[in-house]
Amino acid sequence: MPSDRPLLSLRAAFLRQFLRNGRGIMRRPADVANPLLFFFMVITLFPLGLGPDPIRLATLAPGILWVVALLASLMVSAKLFASDFEDGSLEQLALAPYPLAVTALAEVCAHWLATGFLLALASPIFGVMLGLPNEGLLTLLVSLLLGTICLTLIGALGSALTVNIRRGGLLLSLLIIPLNVPVLIFGTAAVREAVQGGNPESWLALLGGLALGSLVVVPLAIGPALRVSLDS
Amino acid sequence: MWTFIHKLGSPPWFFRFSGTLVRWLLPITVTLLLVGAIWGLLVAPPDFRQGNSYRIIYIHVPAAVVALAGYYLMAFAGAVSLIWRIKMADVTMRASAPVGAILTAIALVTGAIWGKPTWGTWWIWDARITSMLILLFLYLGVVALFEAYENKTAAARACAVLSLVGMVNIPIIYKSVDWWYSLHQPASIKFSGESAIDSSMLYPLLLMIVAFYFLFTVTLLLNMRAELVWTHRESGWLKQLVGDS
């Protein structure tokens, strides 16, 4: 019967959720600017803490940039499902006839475009500030593009598990950091390989594999995690 | 056989069965641990390079092996609980988390104690130690997530999801830490001499590994029984059982 089918095709539902979240994010430009400012300011802390020696900073730059990107991604993950949870639209999403994995993925995509994507695009600037050699800059950008996909997805899983917990932000960090370790390792290895004049393709391929794998597998976990949070 | 597994899903039946099991396993565990410890710590010959300080391997390696296996057990129990909604699988998962975490901590601490005389330092960022540390974080994350939820049914399901994701991640984490270490291996420290281990040292090690598996099982069963006693403290079958003994 016509009334048994959902009103929208799955693709239409995905796009609608994506655009809805995208519009919501655009209405709050602070949510986009703050993570970038955080990235910028924490990067500045490292020369202040380690000393301005450009050679030492250049050696440490890949690690510093990646760790700070990871922390910035943790920070924004806490807010990923929070607003939808509070105003009840997450519950409506769970009740809708579309798989929660797909609609949650739409939300995560919109979130990534506003946070991880911009972070990756801005990263060469901070690389230059830390004295990262020019050979490393493009690899830094690509590695962060792929890496932030993984970081955002895993952060979304953490957010889904902790959205209904008081002060869940700190717990989220505890849960997510071990899962982010491979991304960090591959990302910094790629940049370091490029800086030393080698070919970072194999590391970037590993990052790409992680990104694609996360895109497929993590939403399948985000669905049940959201339902658990809604039920508790 | 399936009937047997079905029956394990019932708390009263499991409680009675595990009671008998523990009564048999506990003396076996203690015997195995004693025999293995004496064999390894006293009887096995001293190492050519490390002298007697290598003997902590008889605690360090079994703890590490069982800690890793325990995580897979926890994740498997979580999967069973998510798919078939079996409460006893929940209990298994919840009970194995702290046991596994403590075993990981034992592995890390004994590793540090081993490191001091061998490498001159308490801590070293090599591949295996770092992987063990991340395993500890994964365990602690599951424990912390469970404590954070007030609704314990939802808590168990959340922990099941988290431990499953962790289980998928563990091979990736181990491999990536391995590659990370091989990239950064400091030239001065050449610890891994993966020399073939002599059988006079291998057999007590294997025995201790088996003993630690038994230890894990017994501790897990005792922990599960404690959880059941707490959860079902008001129920008739438990009161009758306790009143009988």
Image (spheres, coloured by chain):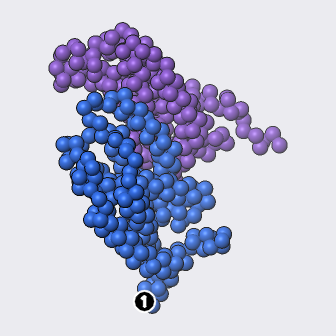
Chain colours: A purple, B blue
Q: Amino acid at mark 1?
A: Ser
Q: Residue at x 22, y 18 (%)?
A: A56
Q: Residue at x 45, y 90 (%)?
A: B244
A42 left or right of A88? left
Q: Residue at x 27, y 25 (%)?
A: A42
A27 left or right of A5? left
Front residue of B42 and A125: B42
Front residue of A6 and A197: A197
Residue farthest to the right, as pictured: A1
Front residue of B154 and B100: B100
**Residue A10: x percent and y percent?**
68, 33
- Image quarter where the N terminus of chain B lies is bottom right
Q: Is residue B57 above or below residue A180?
A: below
Residue farthest to the bottom, as pictured: B244
Q: Residue at x 18, y 15 (%)?
A: A53
Whether residue A36 appears in this view of the structure is yes
Q: Is residue A21 above or below residue B169?
A: above
